[in-house]
Amino acid sequence: MSHHGPQGPSGPRSPHGPHGPRSAKIPYGGDYNPEQWPQEVWDEDHRLFGRAGIDTLTVGVFSWSLTQPAEDTYDFTVLDRILDRAAAEDRKVCLATGTAALPPWLAKKHPEVNRTDFEGRRHRYGQRHNFCPSSPAYRRLSTAMAGRLAERYARHPALIAWHINNEYGGACYCDRCADAFRAWLRDRHGTLDALNDAWWTTFWSHRYTDWDQIEPPSALTEHWRGPDHTAFQGITLDYQRFMTDALLGCFTAEKEAVRAHDPDTPVTTNLMGAYRPLDYHRWAPHLDFASWDNYPPPDAPPTRAALAHDLVRGLKDGAPFWLMEQTPSTTACRDVNPLRRPGELRLVTFQAIAHGADAALYFQMRASRGACEKYHGAMIGHAGRDDTRVFREVARLGRELELLGDATLGARTPARTALLFDWDSWWALEISDGPSRLVRYLDVVHSYYRAAREAGADVDVVPVTADLTPYDVVVAPVLHLVKGDLAERLEAVTRRGGTVLATFLTARSDTHDRAFLTDVPGPLAPLLGIRVDEWDARPEDVVQPVEMGEFTTTARLVFELVRLRGAEPVATYGADFYAGTPAVTRHRHGGHGGEAWYVATALDRSGVDHVVRRVLARHDLLGPHAGHPAVETATRVAPDGTVLRFLLNHGPAPVRLAAPATGTDLLTGKRTERGEPLALDPLGVVVLRLQ
């Protein structure tokens, strides 16, 4: 039903490197759905793409019902035309497998593909993210589609990357998932005795004597007030891990189907940054390059997106990633959807590049006429105009990326500060009964990340399994679970003179979320030089003073009562019966000037800033512009050793700085000597190539 043979169009391979696609400049473009429009609209689209500097299109993301209208029928006629037109216009295509949303015929013919939700309801057809990851029919048909696409388009001249599925997420609690969960548990625990010990099932008479007795934790079993309220943390923690692996299995099955026909073109899927339901560290080895969709909450500070950029960069050991989606103007999925202010799109795009993005793509190229995303921002609106503010900003940015060329491609971040990010700790902390459900993992992590970034430090956000030898400072906020040899590797940081900074509710439990049978903080007690016997939790409006010498700050939520076992107090509580006891401690450890700091409470912003800056200062890691909170700095080092320094002004007022080094602004060509005045406009960007 299409004009190409079974192998698809022939042509030269799209160039790519070991960590992802490669080109002469940052790929620029985004999601494109021409199947929604007649041919004359395609002609106008490509004319406008040329005006805006668009060179890369993500196509086919939700095309399954188009490319497979029935189980035994495939029709690639429209997709052929889309890719051929892109190639004729000298544009590259990131080709999706289209398997993220079921076609109606599949859900009707194979009803087991429809998910069962947390409340135990089997869904009927509708929406998206609507497939059961344990469904044999879904696995068979999705991998067949991926294989057919790869067989047809592997040699297409437009192809630059494969995009499997889309924004994996959600969970299923059907009988098939229950069976798959039991099989996963057998592989993980080996025996029922080991599982019963891991889950501590002697509590509440839960001891299992047969694998078939195990049920997925849902509103019908272990949960009574929602997903975060579980009677058995070990069961729920394992189901989170299982569902991560189940969805990952869908991804790897499609990737294998692609690889059967295309051994070379890089394969990815668009992640969602700090997304709680899926442990992306388990996915990282299976991605040829990482990519993600950046839609921060409307009121989020700039460091929230920066944290997610650095988290995604850390998935592949610091290799560059793709910014797969961002809105050029506004989202449509929230109750209130603010518009990007003039200049904001440019700023956030360069922020992504500063943190390691080697592509800048949008959702979407042309606005959809109907359904729930018809008001979502797009480069081209419903009227198809090229004189809108949004189009002009996109086009202006396209010209600047041409000026930037390949200067940043493949460049890495030479950070000496690491922040440990751990999905297991995230899950365990927030499903724990006690001490406080008001403590949110991501909020605490962000507070320490923000403090380090605003102090001018480049930060690598890494898993707990990462090699820590490159870092002078390792920050471990609310690391609730301590697993494997992490304690020994953190001690090694201080033995060579580095600093470890940990916080309250760290090192409480093991990999199964069982409390350590020793003093808190468990295996980190020798490193931190403290003992915690008790902890107080108070409502959010209860604020306690904390004294840091002449500096006074405040704290809330959790107040751990610390006994010194080698550490010295840095700050003390100023109220309640624990007034005068340590709230922040420092332990000199390792014999080479190393230190381990512990913050026993949720300090306010000024308190976190104070502690983090003291830690960074002892390693000379404070940036020269740390006194300008609106100014973000970041460094990338190109493969040839060229150093690129990014300066971004997130504030509404101009800022004058002293140039941090001698260099040339790649966006203006202006040369600046070290120490000379350097002006940053409101929402302004400077990219200095240092000399």
Image (cartoon, rainbow, N blue to C red):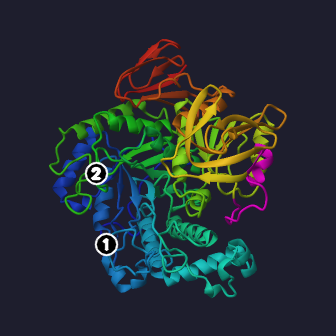
Quarter-of-image position of residue 482: bottom right
Q: Is residue 413 placed above or below 172 in the rendered structure?
A: above
Left or right: 498 as drawn, with respect to 367: right
State which region is magenta: 509-532
- Residue at left offset 28%, top offset 36%: 393
Residue 336's disc number: 2
- Disc 1 residue type? Ser
**Label 1 sits on residue:** 65
Q: Nearer the viewer, residue 466 or 629?
A: 629
- Residue at left offset 85%, top offset 34%: 591
The Cα–Cα distance between marks 1 and 2, rounded to whole angstroms, is: 32 Å
Residue 413: image location, x then y, percent: 58, 36
Left or right: 403 as drawn, with respect to 437: left
Q: Nearer the viewer, residue 452 or 242?
A: 452
- Disc 2 residue type? Val
Q: Is residue 513 magenta?
A: yes
10 Å neighbourhood of mark 1: few (<14), some, or many (≥20)?
some
Q: Is residue 429 placed above or below 178 in the rendered structure?
A: above
Judged from the image, the secondary structure of the residue bearing numbered disc 1 is helix
Q: Residue furthest right?
A: 591
Q: Is residue 24 visible?
A: no
Residue 142: image location, x then y, percent: 44, 73
Quarter-of-image position of residue 556: top right
